[in-house]
Amino acid sequence: MKILLKLLGIVRFSVWWIALAVIAGFATVGSSIGLLMTAAWLLAKASLQPSFHELQIGIVGVRFFGIARGVLRYTERLVSHNTTFRLLATIRVWFYKALEPLAPARIQHYKSADLLQRIAGDIDTLENLYARIIAPPLVAILVSALMWVLLGSFSWQLFLALFIFQILAAIVIPLASYLLTRKIDRKLPEVTTSRQAAVIDFVQGMAELRLFNRIGNQENILRQLEQQEQRLRKQQELIRHAHEPLTGLCMNGAVVSALMILQPMLQSGALDSIWSGVIIIGIMASFEAFLPIPEAAGHLEADRQAGKRIFDIIDAKPEVTTPQHPAVLPQDHTIRFENVSFTYPESTGPVLRNITFSIPQGKKAAIVGPSGAGKSTIAALLHRFYNPSAGRITIGETDITRMDPDNVRSMIGTVSQRTYLFARTIRENLQLGNPEADDEQLQKALVEAGLASFTTRLDQWAGQHGMQLSGGERQRLALARAILHDAPVLLLDEATASLDTITEKAIMQNMMAVGSSRTLLHITHRLYGMERFDMILVLENGQITQQGTHEELLEKNGSYAAMWNLQNRTSPAQDS
């Protein structure tokens, strides 16, 4: 119930649309009841062969309710769909606004398929929130009140009998449906997420699966998950298909009960026989409003589970928040880490321990060390993806925790090891760095990044994840994007780690040229071109063990010299 109340809180801004749609739904069912009751009266009255003017009211009523029913049905569909789409739009925008501050710290442990299921599948499930959960009970209550007015004028026993069977249709059957489908509705999203994850693994890992002859194994996993999902859906549909016959059974029970109550009234002459058929038809027509209620109960658990999965993410506290009064962007871009320590959430030990260093504005610095030493964590802290567990980080003497995270990131142009390119054109991918850049600026950035041949290929499709391009071309595009960003600080985070030596050399030359007028921070475990940097920091086990220029560190003959010799040694055959 708590989850549903929170979901209703999200859509409270559409309450007037919901109210309008409920009224339209009630008016539609009311018109159906009016049409059938009026038609029944007209037929019964006509069988007595009265004068034409005695039938005029019935004729006008049939015409009125017949036309009104069609118009109101169309209006109800129009309003209800508009309400549903408004609710979905509201929920999607709300979810994105709530999700964006959590990235990347709070969502990095989720699988992409799991996030996709929550962002797309679970929110799509919530389209039932109005049309199949909120509206049907409200319409049924209004129809029940209408029948109390109509039948109460004949006999309170009639309405009581009808009300009892309406309770069965509105509460007992939906409750039974809810209890039967609850486990299915809980299990189905998990199986769907697993199947989607398996599909993504299958598509993205196709080459590796073929290489190791595991295509059949992955197909079996997909087949089993698909069969499990289909089995759950069949069970779910089997229960839901029983709703209409059971509601019809309640309707028949109400009709039989009404006939038993009407019989003595007809025999005593307390009721005109014409009205008996009108009452029976009205009772039957009223159950139209109760048909969707068992289905609403069936969707209740699915929506509750979808809401729970959404709130599991959204209820997390953002790792980084924007200060109420953010500090002004500094003019000086000197970077300082002062006794910085950091431990990842849910981690047992610190990744960084008392890190202290300073990179003056316009200087070039490299942070080197083995994998797992904490180098990329320094980049994450500098981007304000996380806040330090201890110590502080400043840019131009301003603590970055006092600054808007977006402003901090606007000062840093980044080229990372994993360059993400969207399935769009090269032009659109480049414009992420500067949405206002024209073709001349795009071409200039491509030339500076060493991609002069791409200046005539701006409208070329990059492919999913940029797979139409080589690894070197993707990294150069990332550099061009950083150039367009025109930030005073350029951060290279293992930007050439997965490239061959020749490509790495070419890209590093481009990067050093681009960073000549900026503060440059190069994070790497490959010691190429170290002699070009003003300072080198050696990071081991989360601590800075050495600091100096390339020549100074080689003279110290420490861990840096050992790494340099290991990466640059030549074999005896080459020496000879």
Image (spheres, grey):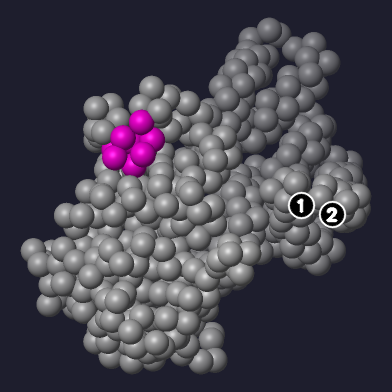
Q: CA distance from mark 1 to mark 2?
A: 6 Å
| Residue 467, percent from left and from top | 58, 40
Residue at x 47%, y 88% (from the top left corner): 541
Q: Indicate yes or no whether the magenta region holds residue 447.
A: yes
Amino acid bearing label 1: Glu
Amino acid bearing label 2: Phe
How dense is the environment of label 2, judged by Cα within 10 Å: few (below 14), some, or many (20 and up)?
few
| Residue 48, percent from left and from top | 82, 16
Quarter of image, res 532: bottom left
Above or below, comparing residue 50 to residue 154 in the picture: above
Above or below, comparing residue 238 to residue 426 in the picture: below
Say which element carries label 2. Answer: loop
Q: Is residue 298 visible?
A: no
Q: Which residues are magenta?
A: 445-452
**Which residue matches tag 1?**
208
Residue at x 28%, y 81% (from the top left corner): 552
- Quarter of the image with the C terminus is bottom right
The one nearer the camera, 86 or 345, is 345
Say which element carries label 1. Answer: helix
The one nearer the camera, 47 or 28, is 28
In this image, 4 relative to 279: left or right?
A: left
Residue at x 65%, y 42% (from the top left corner): 150
**Which residue matches tag 2?**
212
